[in-house]
Image: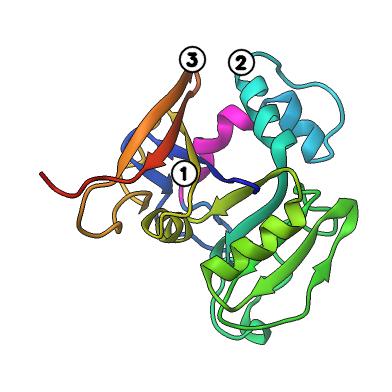
Amino acid sequence: MPRLICDISMSLDGFVAGPNPSLEHPLGEGGERLHEWAFRLASFRETHGLGGGGETGPDDDVAREWLGATGAVVMGRRMFSGGEGPWEDDPNADGWWGDDPPFHVPVFVLTRHARETVTKQGGTSFTFVTEGIEAALEEARAAAEDKDVSLGGGASVVQQYLKAGLLDELQVHVAPVLLGDGTHLFDRLGPGPLELEATRVIASPTVTHLRYQPRPTGGTP
């Protein structure tokens, strides 16, 4: 069965987006700093149709590893467009990425508002799932075939899958940045412990890659 893998960039103080997200600043104010380590990579340039060039090395190896293993993506409505409510009221209803998004695989968007599947260039399609996180994962696993399902976020979606025990692997890319405010990754997980087994640590001057496997706990001591 395809695994559900989350790869997400985070500040040293625990934020995955800056404050005051908007159409002009979809990652919040200063949030793009969390991803600067990726912007310079050869794999990022290839995936985003920016031609050759870019840096190689350990960071590029990590990015290329998860990109190559991804057969489908699950994301939340806010990551897709930043909006909420009926689609006809969403000024960014077509999403952030234009006609040729960087995913190149089927994407399943969690939403409360149904709409038809949107097919883009380069192998990307957006299917809008209104039946909840388990239904979206089931559809994504069927589409991924023998590859992984990547959990794209945002933070609320990651928290839902973590709390439901559906996440197989969490890889956090910690940028040496202190945002001071914004959206925390782990602030609404509820009571009770959640144990993570560290399975890999790779560090460079611009980012530290932490890979964890969630595991069930025996309850509070």
Q: CA distance from mark 3 to mark 2?
A: 11 Å
- Which mark's residue is nearer the viewer, 3 or 2? 2
Name the residue type under label 3.
Answer: Pro
Q: Is residue 110 above or below residue 35?
A: below
Residue named by callout 3: 205
Asked if one can make out residue 115 in the rendered structure from this viewpoint, the answer is yes
Label 3 sits on a secondary structure element that is: loop
| Coordinates of residue 9 in the picture (x, y in percent) | 49, 38
Q: Is residue 92 above or below residue 173?
A: below
Q: Residues within 10 Å of mark 2 (few under 14, many from 20)?
A: few
Q: Is residue 32 magenta?
A: yes
In the image, the segment drawn in magenta is 29-38
On the image, which quarter does residue 23 sit in?
bottom right
- In depth, the one of 192 and 181 nearer the eye is 192
Q: Earlier in the sequence, mark 1 or mark 3?
A: 1
Name the residue type under label 2.
Answer: Pro
Q: Main secondary structure of the magenta part?
A: helix
Residue named by callout 1: 30
Label 1 sits on a secondary structure element that is: loop
